[in-house]
Amino acid sequence: MEDFRDLEGDPNFMRSLARGLLVITAFADRKTPMTIAELARITKLDRSVVRRCLYTLTQLGFAQTHDSRFSLDPSILQLGHSYFSSSRLVEASQPYLDQLGNSIYTNCALAIMSNHEVVYLSRFQSKRLIQKHIGLGSRLPAYCTSVGRVLLAMLDADELDTYLDRETLRPYTEYTVFEKSQLKHLIEKTAEDGFCILDQEIELGMAAIAVPVKTDVAQTSMALSVTVNTKFVAANQLRDMYLDKMTQLASKLSTL
């Protein structure tokens, strides 16, 4: 969630709502309950503000507390479900992803860009390849994921430069490309090629290929990916094995 403090002078901006959402998003990728002090440090909000947000969320049933530590309640899923239920493309794409995944025996997913991160909207999970950290609504950095590079390649030059200037790039594995000039070159190459292949840049043992899905829905661009275990499929095999099927599916998805 982007910093909202420069919007606080806007008379139409609801600061209390922004603070509550900031507290909710602070729980992302945290697998254990947190104290008020921990949440205050993550959100950079005063402890008193965090305490009131947590009290409100708890009273509404969206958070729970035990021994002065807080966690989100499963009912928070109602908020995400509202989006997935209202998105015609998300619902309509699932049968196509299931068909592709069952035919190639590996994972595939549809993703979008949100606040410089990749968000997974729908996916097929193969029994042969378990990715525990990726589910519906999961967020990953754009610069070191195949879908992210495809979506970055769809930005105009000024937008891409702004992204690279603002983003803090770091390696996730020994193969992650995070030097800005090299990354920009690879993103530009992705735009020329019309697809992107990444080899173990976000997770060791995983390679992926992605293609763009151009749609007029909410003027939003999406990307389709296929992920494999490099023990069984090498990254240099992905184009020949999957690209044709993926581009055909991307064409179908763009008309939904």
Image: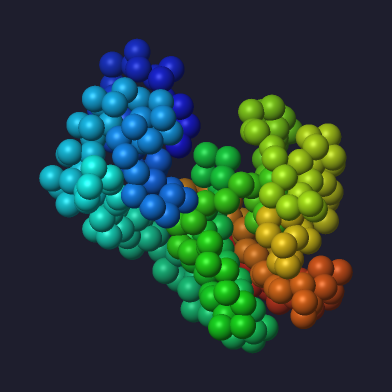
Quadrant position of residue 187: top right
Question: At 46% from the left edge and 27% from the top edge, which residue is drawn?
Answer: 3
Residue 181 appears in the picture as rendered: yes
Question: At 82% from the left edge and 73% from the top edge, which residue is drawn?
Answer: 234
Up-down relation of residue 77 to residue 36 (above or below)? below
Q: Which residue is at the front of the view, 161 or 1?
A: 1
Left or right: residue 102 compared with residue 154: left
Q: Which residue is at the front of the view, 137 or 27?
A: 27
**Picture coordinates of residue 70, whole percent (x, y):** 28, 46
Q: Which residue is at the front of the view, 61 or 47?
A: 47
Left or right: residue 2 compared with residue 113: left
**Picture coordinates of residue 17, whole percent (x, y):** 27, 32
**Picture coordinates of residue 112, whole percent (x, y):** 55, 53
Residue 159 appears in the picture as rendered: no
| Residue furthest left as drawn | 59
Q: Which residue is at the front of the view, 177 or 87?
A: 177
| Residue furthest top as drawn | 9
Quadrant position of residue 39: top left
**Picture coordinates of residue 58, whole percent (x, y):** 18, 46
Question: At 63% from the left edge and 64% from the top edge, which residue is drawn?
Answer: 224
